[in-house]
Image (cartoon, helix red, strand yellow):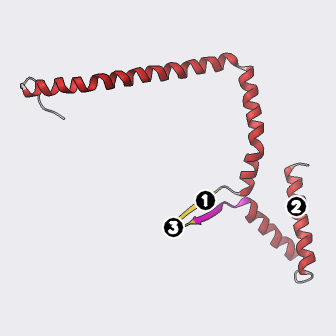
Amino acid sequence: MNEIETTKAFQERVFEKIRADIGNLMTEAELKVLLDAAMKKAFFEPITKTEGYNTHEYPPLFVTMTQDLMKEEVKVAVQKWIEEHPKEMNDTISKVLAGGIAGAIALHLEMRFSHPLELLREELTQKGLVDRKY
């Protein structure tokens, strides 16, 4: 049974329960309109929660449920792609590591030499050999 069938079965059970509980206060058409609007609001409208002075908006319940159902399928698809493309993965990992290592070395050199260079600039400025510009 897929999610659409499950949702439809749930909606029909809710409809029957409401019909049994409230009897003939509403016509069947009015009850269906009311139930349809309630289901749309419950599953397809964004969820707004207020906490103190802050209001947060969250995705609709249907989106959250769909994401939860799809997580495992996406995980399996990604794992399959990785297994089928080892060269691309190795090339990408190598590039990331090389970029990270090069960046780390550059940062280290900058940190290592910035203070001595600043001291040299200050000394040359005091001797009048360089203009004081910031």
Q: Nearer the viewer, residue 26 or 132?
A: 132
Amino acid at circle 1: Glu
Q: Position of residue 118 (x, y in %)?
A: 21, 27
Q: Which mark is residue 80?
A: none
Element at badge 2? Answer: helix
Position of residue 49 in the picture relative to residue 119 (left or right): right
CA–CA distance in space, label 2 to label 1: 26 Å
When the figure is inspected, residue 12 is found, relative to residue 68, above or below; the finding is: below
Amino acid at circle 3: Tyr
| Residue range corresponding to the magenta coloring | 44-50
CA–CA distance in space, label 1 to label 3: 13 Å
Q: Nearer the viewer, residue 37 or 59?
A: 59
Q: Position of residue 28 (x, y in %)?
A: 91, 75
Total tally of numbered discs in the picture = 3
Q: Is residue 14 magenta?
A: no
Q: Which mark is residue 57?
A: 1
Amino acid at circle 2: Phe
Q: Residues within 10 Å of mark 3 (few under 14, many from 20)?
A: few
User: Which residue does the numbered mark 3 point to in the structure image?
Assistant: 53
Q: Nearer the viewer, residue 96 or 37?
A: 96
* Quadrant of the image containing the C terminus: top left
User: Which residue does the numbered mark 2 point to in the structure image?
Assistant: 10
Which circle's residue, 3 or 2, is located before the other in the chain?
A: 2
Which circle's residue, 2 or 1, is located before the other in the chain?
A: 2
Position of residue 33 in the picture relative to residue 82 (left or right): right
Element at badge 1? Answer: strand
